[in-house]
Image (cartoon, helix red, strand yellow):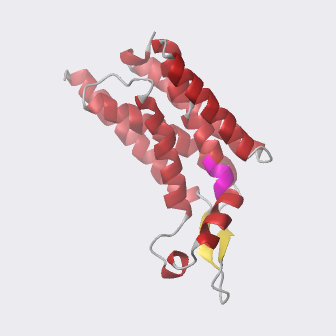
């Protein structure tokens, strides 16, 4: 791997880590209600509903591109689908305190609360933003199957949280911003 590519991968990974750490700070969380034992949603900041999808989408796109650059590979359209998967995983892990025994014993009620509330809207917004990467890569490489799959994923994310337009828009903005940065700094992303 040539030195500029190695520096690029390190810069992308550092930027992704910074964005994901910020996202962890703002992600709406699920915690057990005091005394009742059933989970409830906690929103740590009024900006969490707006900032978190953008931060998670941008961080997951940059992380995926950084890993591809680190191993010296060009990110394929199908490989770019790792970005939405990373974003969803991060949104769920940040939004559910897996170290809290009361949360772990809540069972299916935890999943219902997580996906119905703010965390579900954040996940959908993250998917919308992170799916920009496979759409762009599929358009650049001419991978029609990946483009159709990415379009289906976008439509599914919008359909699941259509009432929460703000996280969908901000997640999309975060994904577009991350892809714009990659189009500028990474030669492999240019058509």
Residue at 73%, 41% in the rendered image: 159
Q: Is residue 84 left or right of residue 188?
A: right
The total number of labels drawn is 0
Quarter of the N terminus within the rendering: top left
> Relative to residue 36, is residue 13 depicted above or below?
above
Magenta span covers which residues?
119-123
* Farthest residue, direction bottom: 35
Image coordinates of residue 143 in percent, x first then y, are 48, 16
* Farthest residue, direction right: 163
Image coordinates of residue 180 in percent, x first then y, are 53, 23
Q: Quadrant of residue 118?
A: bottom right
37 part of magenta stretch: no
Q: Is residue 129 left or right of residue 79?
A: right
* Residue 186 shows in this picture: yes
Residue at 61%, 35% in the rendered image: 153
Q: Is residue 63 left or right of residue 58?
A: left
Q: Quadrant of residue 162?
A: top right
Image coordinates of residue 53 in percent, x first then y, are 61, 45
Residue 50 vs residue 112, the one in the foreground: 112
> Relative to residue 160, is residue 62 depicted above or below?
above
122 part of magenta stretch: yes
Residue at 30%, 35% in the rendered image: 10
Residue 153 vs residue 174, the one in the foreground: 153
Image coordinates of residue 148 in percent, x first then y, are 59, 23
* Residue 22 shows in this picture: no
């Amino acid at each position: 791997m040539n030195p500029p590519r190695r520096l690029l991968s390190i810069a992308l990974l550092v930027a992704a880590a910074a964005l994901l750490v910020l996202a962890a700070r703002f992600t709406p969380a699920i915690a057990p209600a005091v005394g009742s034992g059933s989970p409830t949603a906690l929103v740590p900041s009024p900006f969490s509903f707006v900032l978190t999808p953008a931060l998670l989408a941008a961080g997951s796109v940059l992380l995926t591109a950084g890993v591809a650059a680190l191993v010296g590979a060009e990110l394929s359209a199908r490989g770019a689908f790792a970005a939405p998967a990373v974003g969803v995983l991060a949104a769920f892990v940040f939004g559910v305190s897996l170290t809290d025994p009361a949360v772990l014993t809540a069972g299916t009620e935890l999943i219902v609360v997580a996906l119905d509330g703010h965390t579900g809207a954040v996940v959908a917004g993250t998917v919308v933003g992170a799916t920009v990467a496979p759409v762009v890569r599929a358009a650049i490489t001419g991978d029609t199957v990946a483009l159709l799959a990415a379009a289906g994923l976008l439509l599914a994310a919008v359909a699941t949280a259509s009432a929460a337009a703000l996280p969908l828009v901000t997640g999309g903005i975060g994904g577009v911003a991350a892809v714009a940065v990659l189009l500028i700094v990474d030669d492999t992303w240019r058509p």
